[in-house]
Image (cartoon, grey):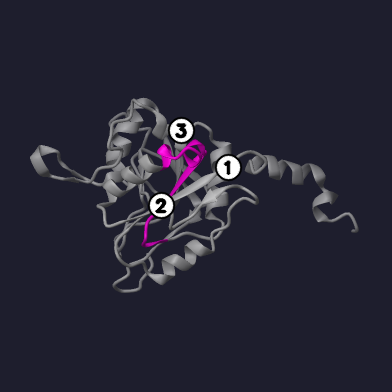
């Protein structure tokens, strides 16, 4: 077959390229909040991430924010990204946390999902809270008329819409952070001070963003490990 396998079925190969959206701009800037040390297993997984060919990208450590509480780190980093005259015009922000191990093709798969679902502002990979009784970070059922963040069950290989995601491996449309209606700081960890309640920075964000029509989902075809650095167990 001298013409090559892809040329042999040109219509199918062309459809694959169009579906993935790699022919258009898919510029990605990666944001990582971190403490003083990062486990080598996490770093190895990030180094193996594949991006679409010949697409601009800013990978860590450019926006690796050190020494800040996680909500503050995300808010400050994205403010800095938006203020950049070039990167601030890009299409996507990828958030990774230092104990998450994404698969090599995770970015490409999330981009493909984004292309197929322009109605979604954020799609994350599937990872679980740590421990034997860990739950999937697919927070809340949008079909329930009562707002909630109960963990939803994964569906193998499928996209599951939810009310909120974790942030361990998420692809966000940068355009949503240009929306002046969203409150700032975007991300804030609630510690029960002054009657503000208790909550994580990710669900604090989605509690506001959903009021303005922003939707999110988890891609159960992108399986992300959640590393317990003290025991070495990956959940």
Sooner in the amino-acid sequence: mark 2 or mark 3: 2
**Residue 224 lies in magenta, yes or no?**
no
Q: Secondary structure at mark 3?
A: helix
Asked if residue 70 shows in the view, the reply is yes
Q: Residue placed farthest to the left in the image?
A: 194
Q: Position of residue 8 (x, y in %)?
A: 85, 50
- Which circle marks residue 26 in the picture? 1
Q: Where's residue 72, x and y in %?
A: 27, 46
Residue hosting label 2: 63
* Residue receiving disc 3: 175
For the residues labelled 2 and 3, say whether their Cβ atoms are less than 8 Å apart: no
Give the residue displayed 10% in from the left and 43% down from the top.
193
Residue 206, placed above or below residue 106: above
Query: Which of 163 and 47 lies nearest the eye of the viewer?
Result: 47
Query: Residue at point 50% right, 36% down?
Result: 89
Question: What's drawn in magenta, residue-wise?
Answer: 81-100
Mark toward the start of the polypeptide (1 vs 3): 1
| Mark 1 nearby-residue class (10 Å; few <14, some 14–19, many ≥20) | some
Using the numbered discs, state the Cα–Cα distance from disc 1 to disc 3 in whole angstroms. 13 Å
Residue at (47% x, 35% y) in the render: 120
């Amino acid at each position: 077959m001298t013409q090559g396998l892809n040329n042999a079925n040109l219509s199918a190969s062309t459809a694959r390229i169009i579906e993935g959206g790699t022919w258009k701009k898919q510029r990605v800037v990666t944001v990582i909040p971190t403490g003083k040390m990062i486990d080598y297993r996490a770093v190895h997984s990030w180094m193996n991430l594949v991006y679409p060919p010949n697409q601009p990208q800013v990978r860590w450590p450019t926006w690796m924010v050190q020494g800040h509480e996680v909500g503050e780190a995300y808010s400050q980093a994205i403010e800095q990204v938006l203020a950049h005259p070039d990167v601030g015009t890009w299409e996507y922000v990828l958030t990774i946390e230092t104990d998450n191990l994404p698969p090599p093709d995770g970015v490409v798969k999330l981009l493909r999902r984004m292309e197929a679902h322009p109605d979604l502002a954020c799609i994350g990979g599937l990872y679980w809270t740590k421990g034997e009784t860990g739950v999937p970070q697919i927070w809340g059922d949008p079909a329930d008329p009562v707002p909630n963040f109960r963990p939803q069950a994964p569906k193998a290989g499928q996209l599951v819409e939810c009310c909120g995601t974790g942030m361990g491996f998420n692809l966000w449309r940068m355009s949503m952070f240009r929306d002046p209606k969203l409150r700032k700081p975007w991300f804030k960890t609630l510690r029960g001070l002054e009657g503000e309640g208790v909550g994580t920075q990710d669900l604090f964000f989605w509690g506001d963003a959903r009021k303005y029509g922003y939707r999110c989902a988890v891609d159960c075809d992108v399986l992300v490990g959640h590393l317990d650095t003290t025991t070495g167990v990956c959940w």
